[in-house]
Image (cartoon, coloured by chain):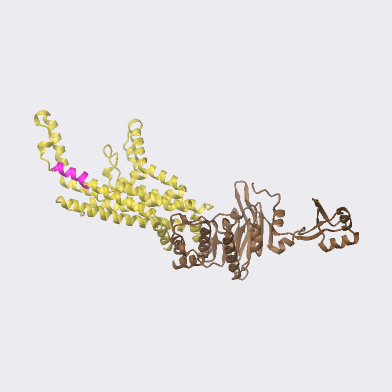
Chain colours: A yellow, B brown
Amino acid sequence: MRLIRSELMKIRTTNVWWIFALSILAFNVLMLLIWTFGYTGDRLRSAKMPMEQMLPPASEVPPEEYERMRQEILASRDIDKILIDGATQIYTSGQFFILLFIMLLGAILMTNEFFHQTATTTFLTTPQRTKVILAKFAAIGFFSVIIWAVTTAVSVGGGAAYLASQGYGAQLGEWQVQRPILMNLLAFVLWGILGVGLGVLLRSQIAAVVVGAVAYVIGSQAVQIAAFLVYEYLIKKDWVIQAMVGWPSVASQVMISPDAFMGAGIVAAPKWWVGLLVLIGYGLFFGVIGTLITRKRDIT
Amino acid sequence: MTSTADGQIVVSGLTKHYGRVRAVDDLSFTVQPGRVTGFLGPNGAGKTTTLRMVLNLVTPTSGAATISGQRYADLADPIRHVGAILEASSAHKGRSGRNHLRIQCAAAGLPLTRADEMLELVGLTPAAKRKFRGYSLGMRQRLGIASAMLGNPSALILDEPANGLDPEGIRWMRDLLRHFASEGRTVLVSSHLLGEMEQLADDVVIIASGKLVAQGAVDDVVKGMSTSEQVRVRTPDADKLVAALGPDAKFSKDNGVLMLSGVSAPEVGAAALRAGVELHELVAERRDLEDVFLELTAGKAAIR
């Protein structure tokens, strides 16, 4: 317990944490604006437009084509679906960037020990290195929970106010809306742990931050391109696309909202719990490998 | 715990290989409480590696080290038993000295107020809330001392603590370590500054190429050398004097100065009188730690 306290003090006693906290809040608010006024607002507006304005004159298209377009528009005007889709995004605003920041914070918490040569002091005070790593996991987890609580409060407060201003309820009673909010909490904690693990594997601060950010931001695009190429030219099987869930950032995406799975248009998206298991698997893998390496390593 | 006094450091058969290099090679020595022990050796002799193995930071290839009869990793809250200063620049640049200490207090279950007490002890109170980045080298060493003393340990281990200190700082450090030892605690301090060590240390452990070369009280180590005393003579008749001294005396001539070993100054004086040799100078030169050190470690290349 006191080790966790010590690790939390390490986070709190430098400027890094509030720079991260401010960035996280900034993205949280920015994405909240986009998901409310932009995404949900647009869909609500078009749902309220008179049908005639959205269809070409009936004389210009064949009747069956006209009917298809009409059905499509009708489907998109399902207010309940718009509200639930919107609430799901609104209440997890900024998730993509927040996860990135949490992972980097976890990585820095570990690499700082080597960058600033504080590993010596840390391991002199606590020679049981496994305990130190576990305390770091706990500290970043604790920090992630606070970040989740604050950003979710902002998103839910702002989002519910927006929906109310449009004359709708907050949709918080829906499991489809609750689940992403809860999964977000899990994702925050797991990405923090992944970050610490990454910091152990790549002791260099710069390397850990660059590799982490690149793998996170560009990695999922690269995985997507690779999967689609294989699917298109080599193995035309659904599992090729579904296997993208093996990449951590795709896994957390699937865990929170399977609908957003990048291959969803082509094949069935993997179930949300598959994403959860993959992410837990990475967390365990990085955690165990990182701990084993730290136990063996000479601190010089 | 009758055989091992509190704070006693015992190194037995400690060995560390890096690839094919034997950085430390079957090293054994004992450090007693209540005395300052200098840990000497040329650069690259394995001093730092040895200290880090004692402190469980580096895993030995074989052998072990104990403090008060226990391995460092087995001590409950080791900083309450052993304080260590290994490098001056080991704090986060963007963190205040006070917070640096408080973090250790928290991890070791010490009251956080202990940090302020130690800052006061080392005279850093005015800089307590300043960031570490703004500390001078001397201030960093003082913070290191404060950190080592947090747990009120019975043993102190310091690696080159005088590095980068100004003369006043070196004196402060020396007084502090002497005081610490006088309270019955163990002080093991590595250095390559031999003049400094001769003033400070009661005992010395000398290593070269990772192996033990000499160990014991400073005076004993110096006296124990076969050529511990030399006699310097100036005389216009060197050959006659050497002949008069007999075969036991070894001599060397340099710039009209005759250096004699294996004989004492009174014997030289008596021999000169008997032989009627004129003397212009007759000085018994006691050898110091530096001479002994250089002689003991000669030919053991630092770079391996």
- Whether B63 is drawn above or below A274: the answer is below
Judged by its main secondary structure, the magenta piece is helix
Q: Is residue A46 magenta?
A: yes
- Whether B29 is drawn above or below A276: the answer is below
Q: Would residue A256 appear left or right of B251 to someone viewing this image?
A: left
**Residue A131: x, y in percent?**
45, 58
Q: What's the residue at 60%, 46% (across, down)? A: B19
User: Can residue A77 be seen here?
Assistant: no
Q: What's the residue at 37%, 56% (across, down)? A: A141
Give the position of the N terminus of chain A as an image quadrant: bottom left
**Residue B184: x, y in percent?**
60, 70
| Residue furthest to the front | B280
Q: What's the residue at 32%, 40% (across, down)? A: A242
- Whether B105 is drawn above or below B258: the answer is below
**Residue B26: x, y in percent?**
65, 55
Magenta residues? Answer: A36-47
Q: How many numbered tags mark residues here?
A: 0
Front position in the image: B161 or A261: B161
Q: Would residue A229 appear left or right of B41 to someone viewing this image?
A: left
Q: Is residue A20 magenta?
A: no
Front position in the image: B232 or A46: B232
Q: Would residue A168 appear left or right of A34 to someone viewing this image?
A: left
Tell me the quarter of the picture where residue B57 sits. bottom right
Q: Would residue A80 appear left or right of A12 to someone viewing this image?
A: left
User: Can residue A68 be seen here?
Assistant: yes
**Residue B114: x, y in percent?**
47, 67
Front position in the image: B120 or A169: B120
